[in-house]
Amino acid sequence: MILRDVLSVAIHGIPLALIDFSLSPGLGFALCYSPAIAMVGKYFSRRKALAYGISLSGSGIGIFILAPVVQLLIEQFSWRGALLILGGFVLNLCVCGALMRPITLKEDQTTPEQNHVCRTRTQDLKRASPCSTWTKEWVQTCLCSSLQQEYSFLLMSDFVVLAISVLFMAYGCSPLFVYFVPYALSVGVTHQQAAFLMSILGVIDIIGNITFGWLTDRRCLKNYQYVCYLFAIGLDGLCYLCLPMLQSLPLLVPFACTFGYFDGAYVTLIPVVTAEIVGTTSLSSALGVVYFLHAVPYLVSPPIAGWLVDTTGSYTAAFLLCGFSMIFSSLLLGFARVVKKMKKTQLRFLAKESDPKMQLWTNGSVAYSVARELDQKDGESAALAMLGSSPT
């Protein structure tokens, strides 16, 4: 009887516990995280990177503070009481969400022509039968067009390159936080010193979130936030490549400081770079795609790194693979930006050679010509000259 009860709990209880404690919180936090980050981009324009840095530093501060607090709650109220208190604490996210007042930006506003078309179609829909074929086709067309407009950034070449680079960048993020302490122990560092290294890594990560966002909002770096993002990812990759040569505590402390700072730096600039590519209108959907792509290799890379450690007997191969992955991510984005600038320069040069009156301004892939306006001005000046020279 006891064995049957134990097997019943093992078969039926564990899956329910996994659903309760993994799927439900994961889905809830995912629905909170992306909209909260996207709202920061809507509220701030001048000091956007600093605003993102402060908002994203909250997760690091929470991890740093709540770890001892949760342990204290478990000792005082048991794990059930601790979960109840944490649940009430997390419930305050509803209050935070209610304080996010929705605003409408200029680029989110629809034109009067679009409003007129929508009103006309709505009136026609009311006159039509609810079960008519035309109504169903119109609803399907509206849904497809709205989805196509919302996710049109998926067809942008810049966003595709960003998505691919995020896959390689995310692969290199996770293994260090999993294997840094075991690696430190393997080179002769004590348990207390290894825990101290992780504390340094977490605190410097928070500092990097805030200070790097503030630095990139300065006038001298405001137009180079994309380059700063590449620089931070590349330096983290170089830190990975140097890690196998660092085998003592005095060498691992500077590594923890450097890696932690630039890890917090590029995390702050991910929403900024995404907004620069897709704009603020589709930022929420774009961030959802970016963080989804970030989560896949972030989940897969630690088991792969562990397999490499077990196969080779050292951490060198795992760390080198992570370093080269992050460096490739940085180089891919840099190469794409250089190719884009070369195309713009070539387009301007060809336009100037084809017509001396042609002046070309490029905004992405859209070009505007003002040659016709120049011709009209030349014609008006010639007409005025003829009128001035005619006898009165």
Image: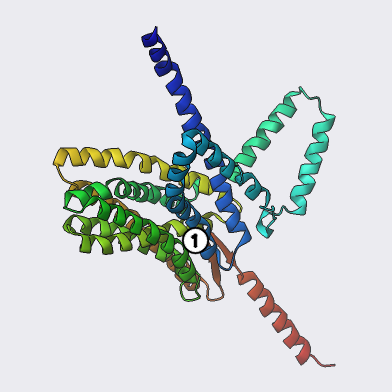
Return the x and y of residue 342 as percentages of the image width and height: 40, 65
Can residue 343 be spotted in the picture? no
Residue sitting at x 66%, y 52%: 100
Where 161 sits versus 387, above or below?
Answer: above
Q: Is residue 124 left or right of residue 370?
A: right
State the image quarter where residue 90 is shown. top right
Where 7 sits versus 377, above or below?
Answer: above
Residue sitting at x 45%, y 20%: 13
Q: Amino acid at mark 1?
A: Gly
Query: Circle 1: is it few (<14), some (14-19), or many (20+) Cα within 10 Å?
Result: many
Q: Secondary structure at mark 1?
A: helix
Where 145 sits versus 206, above or below?
Answer: above
Return the x and y of residue 241 as percentages of the image width and height: 22, 56
State the image quarter where residue 117 is shown. top right
Question: Where does label 1 land, which residue?
Answer: 53
Q: Is residue 177 left or right of residue 291?
A: left
Q: Is residue 139 left or right of residue 242?
A: right
Return the x and y of residue 379 as percentages of the image width and height: 69, 78
Residue sitting at x 78%, y 25%: 130
The residue nearer to you, when weighing 225 against 341, is: 225
Return the x and y of residue 259 as percentages of the image width and height: 32, 59
